[in-house]
Image (cartoon, grey):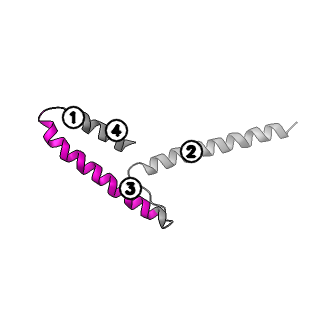
Amino acid sequence: MALVALQIGLSILTIVPFLGLIMIPLHFLVALGALALWIVLLLKANQGQMYKLPVKSATWRKSRLDSFLRAVKNRAAAQESQQSP
């Protein structure tokens, strides 16, 4: 998602007359880096390896884990309240 936002931002900045000369090669380098990262992740997945991206995966995983644990606790509490008379 961040890559899409970066590409859109670079595309908008390309319209500015003198920034366009700088942004077009930068746009290409970002796209090339994204392609390289995508290929590396595809190869890791094909080998059955889990690869964590260091930028956002730790916070995303923690927030997803927290919400999952809250849901499990809520479900367990709901089941206990239904079972007890």
Residue type at mark 1 is Leu
Query: Is 29 placed left or right of 65 in the picture?
Result: left
Looking at marks 3 and 1 on the same chain, the residue that comes earlier in the sequence is marked by 1
SS for dot 2: helix
Residue type at mark 3 is Trp
Between the C-alphas of marks 2 and 4, the distance is 27 Å
Q: Are marks 3 and 4 in contact (CB under 8 Å)?
A: no
Residue at horizontal 73 percent and vertical 43 percent from the top? 76
Query: Is 10 placed left or right of 53 in the picture?
Result: left
Q: Out of 65 and 47, give the one closest to the viewer.
A: 47
SS for dot 1: helix
> Quadrant of the image for the C terminus?
top right
The image position of residue 54, as x and y in percent, is 39, 54
Q: Which corner quadrant of the image does residue 64 belong to?
A: top right
Q: Are marks 3 and 1 in contact (CB under 8 Å)?
A: no
Looking at marks 3 and 4 on the same chain, the residue that comes earlier in the sequence is marked by 4
The residue that mark 4 highlights is 5
Q: Is residue 66 above or below residue 53?
A: above
Residue type at mark 2 is Asp
Q: Are marks 2 and 1 in contact (CB under 8 Å)?
A: no
The extreme right residue here reads 85
Kindly identify which numbered label has been placed on residue 13. 1
Kindly identify which numbered label has been placed on residue 38. 3
Looking at marks 2 and 4 on the same chain, the residue that comes earlier in the sequence is marked by 4
Looking at marks 4 and 1 on the same chain, the residue that comes earlier in the sequence is marked by 4
Between the C-alphas of marks 3 and 2, the distance is 28 Å
Residue at horizontal 38 percent and vertical 59 percent from the top? 39
Residue numbers of the magenta segment:
17-44
Q: Crowdedness of circle 1 by 10 Å Cα count: few (<14), some, many (20+)?
A: some
